[in-house]
Amino acid sequence: NPTGLGELTQTDRLSALWTEKLSPRFSYALGAAAYRNQPIFATSAVASDTYYRLNGNVTYLVTEDWSIEANIAHAQQRPDQGESAQANSFFFSTRYSLPTHLHSF
C-alpha cells in the first residue's frame, strides 16, 4: 500500500461481517475489522500502526426501490509511536435502487 509519504507498506487485515434479515422489510448488519500497517523497508520513515473499526447499521425497505438506513461506527488508530486517535460517526441515509428488469417497447 502506498502512503502519503510515497513509501510502501504492507497491510494485514482481519474482518468479520454479520447480516441478518429480520423481516421482509427490516435488516441489520454488524461488522468488525482490524488492520496492521507496517513499512516494507526497515529504513522507512513510516511508523507501524494498528487500526480497529466496529460498525453497525439497520435498514428499512420502504418500497422495492427505496430504503432508509442508520449507520454507526467507532474507529481507533494505535501507532507504535506517538498519539492514538479515535473517531465515532453516525449517519442516516436514503437509497434508491434502479429497477433491475428492463422494459421493452
Image: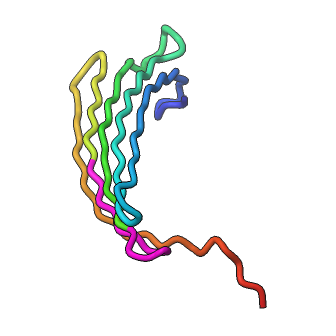
Which image quarter: residue 61?
bottom left
Name the colour scheme. Answer: rainbow
Number of numbered discs: 0
- x 41%, y 39%: residue: 17
Where is residue 54 shown, x and y percent of the image? 30, 38
Q: Quadrant of the N terminus?
A: top right
Where is residue 64 shown, x and y percent of the image? 48, 74
Instruction: From the viewer's perspective, tell me whether residue 73 is left or right of residue 95.
Output: left
- x 43%, y 76%: residue: 63
Q: Quadrant of the C terminus?
A: bottom right
Residue 75 vertical placement versus 66 (above, below): above
Where is residue 67 shown, x and y percent of the image? 40, 70
The residue lying toward the viewer, choosing from 29 and 42, is 29
Residue 82 vertical placement versus 102 (above, below): above
Q: Does the magenta stretch include residue 69?
A: yes
Where is residue 56 shown, x and y percent of the image? 31, 47
Which image quarter: residue 84?
top left
Q: Which residue lies furthest to the front in this view?
A: 23
Instruction: From the viewer's perspective, tell me whether residue 4 is left or right of residue 103.
Output: left
Q: Which residue lies furthest to the top in this view?
A: 42
Q: Is residue 94 magenta?
A: no
Magenta residues? 61-72
- x 48%, y 17%: residue: 39
The residue lying toward the viewer, choosing from 15 and 62, is 62
Q: State whether the magenta stretch is mostly helix, strand or loop.
A: strand
